[in-house]
């Protein structure tokens, strides 16, 4: 039975890893569909190469920082218990690699390619696992301190704060340091629209992300005996709530509508194992409306050129999710309990603080040392031609 359980656990978390790996295709197509045509190839290449760099950084550095585990031993030792530790690494890697994938959407169309890869290595190798170890592996006694202070530890079941808020707030700093795309805002303060290049690709990316998210959330149990249908149901209800709110508040705009389910899913991650489904629905409704309202405010009033709206979607909806877990996870509102709002507030603030400081250190340092923005000519030409020397759809076919 022990052999059967270890094999089942390895298969369970491997399937989760594959589902979250597929989400990176979702990130790629969501960005491809949102950016202008001249930057579509760059969107596809960035997500893939960022994942490869993330794997190297997390394998050699990040996973050890977060969990104290390294892979510098013989294959015979690594293969014990059906290689469970190996597939656990694979699963948690897909979470870590979501950080640069999130950031990529915010800084699209004007960020240099190579400096972003360096940022990816530092963020996934050092910044992200530092907070991951605090939230999920009891590092530095911070969880014990929060529990002593509030009665319960900071709870983030599937990463509303650890993954999404951290990625979204780092992206905000990068967006500020980069500045807006040329021509996005005029000197008179007017906003020049850059409409999505392909709604079908945008929708495809959102669908891939939404489906993979059930691996992201449900498989966060990490062993098959801890699997919870409540997590699946709450993820579904938050997804639906986010969709409906974004559709209504966004006045049927397809870009808002297809980001709505993602907003709901971001927000429900933290408390998906504790909430009642009706609470999860409400969390999704708030997240969908929050995304549309803040995306509009950020773009049109504050004039921060966040191309995919990753700060409202991941940064703010992730923060809402961390706090919402402390509200709707309580027994008073139908949840399972074992959570406090104060504990969630403290843990969420620590995560956001680490992200902001880390973002300034990484992107501020790269800006000073080597620059992080393409030249005016490169940006005008588009990243596809200036970086990759090919467009997504050649203007003409060779005649021979």
Image (cartoon, rainbow, N blue to C red):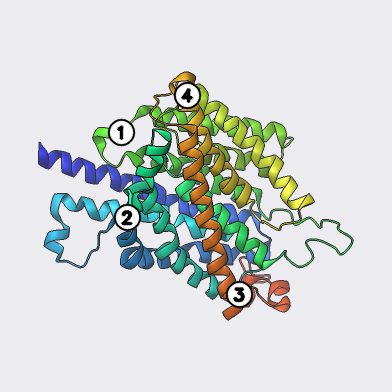
Q: Which residue is mark 4?
A: 277
Q: Is residue 315 left or right of residue 253?
A: left
User: Which is nearer the eye, 384 or 278?
Assistant: 278
* Helix, strand or loop under label 1: loop
Position of residue 278 relative to residue 362, above or below, is: above
Specify which label sits upstream in the sequence, 3 or 1.
1
Task: Find the distance from the CA under tag 2 to the CA under tag 1.
Answer: 19 Å
Specify which label sits upstream in the sequence, 3 or 4.
4
Q: Quadrant of residue 143 in the image?
A: top left
Q: Which residue is mark 1?
A: 227
Q: Which residue is mark 2?
A: 90
Task: Find the distance from the CA under tag 3 to the CA under tag 1.
Answer: 44 Å
- Quarter of the image with the C terminus is bottom right
Task: Find the distance from the CA under tag 1 to the CA under tag 4.
Answer: 16 Å
Task: Find the distance from the CA under tag 4 to the CA under tag 2.
Answer: 30 Å
* Helix, strand or loop under label 2: helix
């Amino acid at each position: 039975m022990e052999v059967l359980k270890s094999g089942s656990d390895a298969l369970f978390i491997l399937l989760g890893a594959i589902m979250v790996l597929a989400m990176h295709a979702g990130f790629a197509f969501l960005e491809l569909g949102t950016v202008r045509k001249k930057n579509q190839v760059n969107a596809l290449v960035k997500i893939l190469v960022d994942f490869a760099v993330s794997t190297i950084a997390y394998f050699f550095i990040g996973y050890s920082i977060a969990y104290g585990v390294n892979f510098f031993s013989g294959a015979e030792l690594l293969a014990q218990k059906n290689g469970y530790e190996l597939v656990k690494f694979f699963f948690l890697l897909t979470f870590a690699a979501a950080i640069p994938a999130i950031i990529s959407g915010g800084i699209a169309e004007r960020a240099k390619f190579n400096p972003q890869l360096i940022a990816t290595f530092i963020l996934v190798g050092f910044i992200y696992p530092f907070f991951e170890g605090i939230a999920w592996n009891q590092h530095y006694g911070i969880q014990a301190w929060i529990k002593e202070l509030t009665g319960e530890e900071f709870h983030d079941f599937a990463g509303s704060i650890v993954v999404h808020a951290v990625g979204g707030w780092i992206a905000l700093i990068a967006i500020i340091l980069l500045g807006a795309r040329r021509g996005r805002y005029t000197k008179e303060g007017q906003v020049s629209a850059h409409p999505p290049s392909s709604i079908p690709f945008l929708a495809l990316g959102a669908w891939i992300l939404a489906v993979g998210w059930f691996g992201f959330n449900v498989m966060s149990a990490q062993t098959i005996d801890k699997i919870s249908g409540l997590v699946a149901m709450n993820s579904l209800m938050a997804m639906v709530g986010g969709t409906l709110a974004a559709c209504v508040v966004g006045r049927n705009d397809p870009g808002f509508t297809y980001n709505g389910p993602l907003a709901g899913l971001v927000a429900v991650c933290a408390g998906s194992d504790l909430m009642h489904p009706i609470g999860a629905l409400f969390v999704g409704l708030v997240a969908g409306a929050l995304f549309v309202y803040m995306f509009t405010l950020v773009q049109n009033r504050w004039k921060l050129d966040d191309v995919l709206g990753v700060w409202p979607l991941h940064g703010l909806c992730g923060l809402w999710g961390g706090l919402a877990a402390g509200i709707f996870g309580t027994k008073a509102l139908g949840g399972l309990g074992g959570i406090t709002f104060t504990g969630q507030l403290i843990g969420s603030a620590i995560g956001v603080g680490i992200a902001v400081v880390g973002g300034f250190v990484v992107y501020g340092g790269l800006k000073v040392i080597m620059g992080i923005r393409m030249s005016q000519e490169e940006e005008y030409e588009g990243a596809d031609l200036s970086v990759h020397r090919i467009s997504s759809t050649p203007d003409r076919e060779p005649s021979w």
